[in-house]
Image: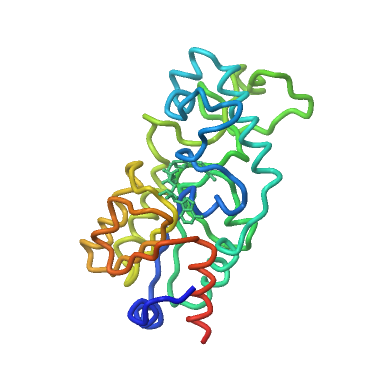
């Protein structure tokens, strides 16, 4: 992929790069984005109807089955060229921060050392009542198992719609957003808050915004450069430009 020379110059001169990724970067690993998940078993449910505390209270077994299905997909997925390029980019900048809205763990699997997981992880669990961290029992049934400490049901350690983000993760994301020269937003529809406000905060703090997305988003008009296309190809081209 050919990148605009101005974008390459901006990246090369940046001392601090902050990256925000969304479901689009994992699409090339075979994981559906929420917007694209229109087919299959779960197409009759909207994520907003399953990924909430109310849904879990109403029908914990249904929500648990949906997450078991998503977890099974993630367990078979491999990091793609985009994840790998970002892991390599880490050492090319004086300061580098990787913030993700994804819950699939693929950045860490690609070798990124420090990932700010704003929305938690499908690979961790906690109890619904008190948030006690928990491991999954080996023999899983159809519904959520009980917490060994308090007996309440286990749930995935992800942030559901209507829930607060982990304060420490959000604070680290905001610091990295305020202190970067270039903010790179990749494969996110920039609609889910508070993550969606980070690129806007970076702009307000004087950073140059680069967007990579298959489609236009609310950020496109505000980006100094908007690269339209595959996250994997764009990030490989950026890494090559940094090394070239
Ligand atoms: P989204 O589904 O709202 O948007 C995905 C964006 O990626 C879209 O703008 C789309 O145009 C773009 N895109 C799709 N394929 C692409 C590609 N190959 N290259 C570049 N761009 C591509 O996702 P979001 O903005 O991350 O927000 C929705 C929520 O969905 C988040 O909270 C996230 O936790 C959750 N989610 C996570 C995963 C995951 O962990 N892999 C998967 C689905 C949803």
In this rendering, the count of numbered labels is 0
Camera-side residue of 1 and 131? 1
* Quadrant in the picture for residue 157: top right
**For the view shown, which residue lies furthest in the top direction?**
58
Residue 232, placed above or below residue 104: below
Residue at screen point 24% across, 59% down: 221
Q: Is residue 47 above or below residue 170?
A: above
Q: Residue at x 45, y 76 (%)?
A: 2
Write the residue at 49% across / 12% down: 58
Residue 72 appears at what percent x and percent y?
68, 37
Instruction: Name the residue located 51 percent from the left edge and 23 percent from the top edge.
Output: 44
Q: Is residue 193 above or below residue 51?
A: below
* In-image side of 176 versus 84 (left or right): left
Which color scheme did the rendering employ for the protein? rainbow
Image location of residue 225, percent across then percent down? 32, 69
Can you name the residue that lies furthest to the left here? 204
Foreground pick, 15 / 36 = 36
The front one of 58 and 209 is 209
Q: Position of residue 129 (x, y in %)?
A: 51, 21
């Amino acid at each position: 992929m050919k990148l605009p020379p101005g974008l390459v110059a901006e990246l090369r001169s940046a001392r601090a790069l902050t990256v925000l990724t969304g479901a689009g970067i994992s699409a090339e690993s075979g994981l559906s984005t929420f917007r694209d998940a229109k087919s299959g078993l779960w197409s009759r449910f909207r994520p907003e109807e399953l990924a909430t505390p109310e849904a879990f209270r109403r029908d914990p077994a249904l929500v648990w089955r949906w997450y078991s299905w998503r977890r099974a997909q993630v367990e078979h997925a491999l990091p793609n060229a985009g994840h790998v390029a970002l892991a390599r980019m880490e050492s090319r900048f004086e300061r580098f921060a990787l913030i993700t809205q994804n819950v699939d763990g693929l950045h860490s699997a690609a070798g990124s050392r420090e990932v700010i997981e704003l929305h938690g992880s499908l690979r961790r669990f906690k109890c619904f009542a008190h948030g006690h961290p928990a491991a999954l029992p080996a023999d899983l049934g159809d519904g959520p198992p009980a917490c060994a400490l308090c007996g309440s049901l286990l749930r995935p350690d992800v942030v559901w719609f209507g829930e607060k983000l982990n304060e420490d993760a959000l604070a680290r994301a905001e610091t990295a957003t305020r202190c970067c020269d270039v903010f790179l937003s990749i494969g996110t529809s920039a609609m889910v808050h508070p993550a969606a406000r980070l690129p806007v905060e970076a702009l307000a703090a004087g950073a140059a915004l680069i967007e990579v997305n298959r489609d236009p988003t609310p950020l496109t008009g505000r980006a100094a450069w908007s690269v339209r296309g595959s996250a994997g190809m764009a990030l490989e081209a950026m890494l090559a430009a940094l090394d070239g």
